[in-house]
Image (tube, rainbow, N blue to C red):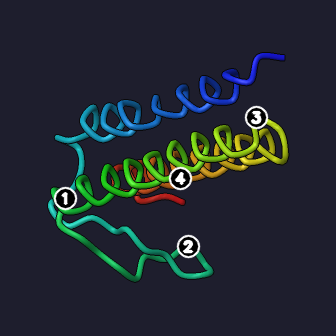
C-alpha cells in the first residue's frame, strides 16, 4: 500500500471549514444578534455569544483542529512510514470533525428554531 495514502486521507477533512462557513452564512439573516451557544444537560441554553463572535469561534475551533490533525498525521506518516496507528488516528480525526460540525450545525439550527 502506498505510504502517502495516509497523508492524502487527511485532506478531505478540510471540507469541514467551508461547510461550517456556508452553514453559518446561509442562515445569517435568521440568526439572532445574541446566540445561545452553550447548553445544560436538559438542552436548555445557559451561555450566549454575539452572532459574530459565535461565527468566528466556530470557524476558529474548526481551523485549529484541522491544523492539529494535519500536522499530527504528517508527523505520524513521516515517523512510522504510514504504519503503527496512523489509520486509527485518521478515523478518530474524521469522527471528531463530524462531531464538531454537527455541534456547530446544531447551534445554528437551535438559534433559528429555538427547538433542540
Q: CA distance from mark 3 to mark 4?
A: 26 Å
Q: Secondary structure at mark 1?
A: helix
Helix, strand or loop at mark 3:
loop
Q: Nearer the viewer, residue 18 or 114?
A: 18
Which quarter of the rendering shows the C terminus? bottom right
The alpha-carbon separation of the residues under discs 1 and 3 comes to 42 Å
| Mark 2 lies on residue | 43
Q: Nearer the viewer, mark 3 or mark 2?
A: 3
Can you give x and y, in whole percent of width and height, for residue 48 in the image?
Answer: 29, 75
Occupied quadrant, residue 41: bottom right
The residue sitting at 43% across, 74% down in the picture is 38
| Residue lying at 73% horizontally and 48% vertically, measured from the top left | 89
The residue lying at 72 percent from left, 49 percent from top is 92
Q: What SS does tag 4 mark?
A: helix
Q: Nearer the viewer, mark 1 or mark 3?
A: 3
Dot 2 alpha-carbon crowd within 10 angstroms: few under 14, some 14 to 19, many 20 or more: few
> Along the polypeptide, which appears first: circle 3 or circle 2?
2
Residue 15 image position (x, y, % from top left): 46, 29
Q: Residues within 10 Å of mark 1 (few under 14, many from 20)?
A: some
Report, in whole angstroms, how far the alpha carbon at label 2 lies from the one at label 4.
Answer: 17 Å
Q: Which mark is residue 51?
A: 1
In the picture of the structure, the residue carrying the numbered disc 3 is 82
The answer to whether marks 2 and 4 mark residues whose Cβ atoms lie closer than 8 Å is: no
Give the CA distance from mark 4 to mark 1. Answer: 18 Å
Callout in the foreground (4, 1) = 4
Rendered image quadrant of residue 20: top left
Labels 4 and 1: the sequence-earlier one: 1
Q: Determine which quarter of the picture holds residue 17.
A: top left
Mark 4: give few (<14), some (14-19) or many (20+) Cα within 10 Å.
some
CA distance separating discs 1 and 2: 20 Å
Q: Which mark is residue 100?
A: 4
Mark closer to the chain start, 2 or 4: 2
Amino acid at each position: 500500500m502506498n505510504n502517502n495514502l495516509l497523508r492524502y486521507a487527511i485532506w478531505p477533512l478540510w471540507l469541514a471549514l467551508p461547510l461550517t462557513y456556508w452553514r453559518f452564512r446561509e442562515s445569517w439573516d435568521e440568526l439572532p444578534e445574541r446566540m445561545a451557544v452553550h447548553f445544560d444537560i436538559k438542552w436548555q441554553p445557559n451561555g450566549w455569544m454575539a452572532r459574530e463572535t459565535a461565527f468566528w469561534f466556530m470557524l476558529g475551533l474548526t481551523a485549529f483542529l484541522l491544523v492539529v490533525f494535519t500536522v499530527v498525521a504528517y508527523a505520524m506518516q513521516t515517523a512510522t512510514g504510514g504504519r503503527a496507528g496512523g489509520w486509527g488516528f485518521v478515523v478518530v480525526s474524521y469522527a471528531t470533525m463530524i462531531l464538531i460540525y454537527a455541534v456547530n450545525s446544531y447551534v445554528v439550527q437551535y438559534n433559528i428554531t429555538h427547538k433542540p
